[in-house]
Amino acid sequence: MIRRQRPTLPTIPAMTLLALGLGFGLAGCATTSEPVEPPPPPVAQSLPPSFPPQDLVGSYGLAAYHKPEDRERTEAAAVNQCKQPYVITLGGTGGVMMHLADQPTPTELRLKGAPGGKNFIGPAEDPPGSAQDREVMSFDGRVLILRWIDAEVQGRYGTMVYVRCPPEGVKKPRPAAKPKPAAKPAAARPAAARPAPAPVQPPIQRQ
């Protein structure tokens, strides 16, 4: 009886498998040794700001503080700087002309809205909250407070306080005087003693 032999697959020498295994192992080591860069942060979408840039146009007294408890005092100091005001004007493309950090000349910056009702002022090409931006901490039409996003710049410049200057010819408002304490009531004086009535001479009786 003739037995048919099954076709055999070509065998790979053991040394070849070992070499391939070492090759894959080295490739794997080389791959894992490379630093994996984190994905870039998502770009925040710019939203319409809470107020138009035209509201920022004007002349301001400018000062800065580093401690929150110095804010009230800094606002008073900014009013005194209206002798040499910081002027904000509109730019040619709808932005506002202001200075970036360490820049001697103003640049047209964009007022950018962000989720959560936040507002930022910075270059138009950067998303809200970028390194060159300043966050609008508050703005009531008269006092504008800006905080630098870059921590190093914020440490040098501090929180910026802009107080709108009064129109020319109008005296700046003086701070309200503190009410004077009420005067103490005067102590009651004793009533003066009335003089005794003069004695009345009795009528002379004639005999």
Image (cartoon, rainbow, N blue to C red):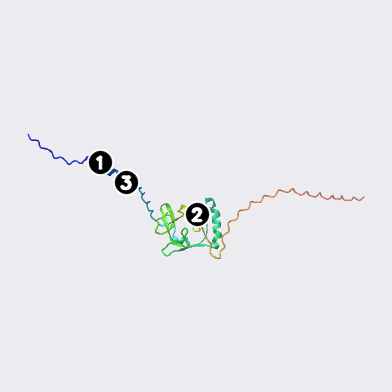
Please tell me in which quadrant of the rendered image residue 107 appears.
Answer: bottom left
Q: Which residue is mark 2?
A: 156
Q: Earlier in the sequence, mark 3 or mark 2?
A: 3
**In the image, is residue 19 above or below residue 115?**
above
Residue found at x 32% / y 46%: 30
Q: Which residue position holds label 3?
A: 30
Nearest the camera: 67 or 26? 26
What residue lies at 55% left-to-right and 60% top-to-bottom?
Answer: 81
Task: Say what amino acid the circle numbered 2 marks.
Answer: Arg
Q: Give the side of residue 97 with respect to residue 25, left or right.
A: right
- Spot occupied by residue 168 in the image (x, y as percentages of width and height): 54, 65
Q: Nearer the viewer, mark 3 or mark 1?
A: 1
| Position of residue 49 measured from the top left corner of the image (x, y, whole percent) | 42, 57
Name the spot of residue 182 as percent of width and height, x first. Answer: 64, 51
Looking at the picture, tell me which residue is in the foreground, 178 or 186: 178
Label 3 with label 1: CB-CB less than 8 Å: no
- Between circles 3 and 2, the one closer to the viewer is 3
Looking at the rendered structure, the kind of residue marked 3 is: Ala
Position of 176 with respect to 39 (left or right) is right
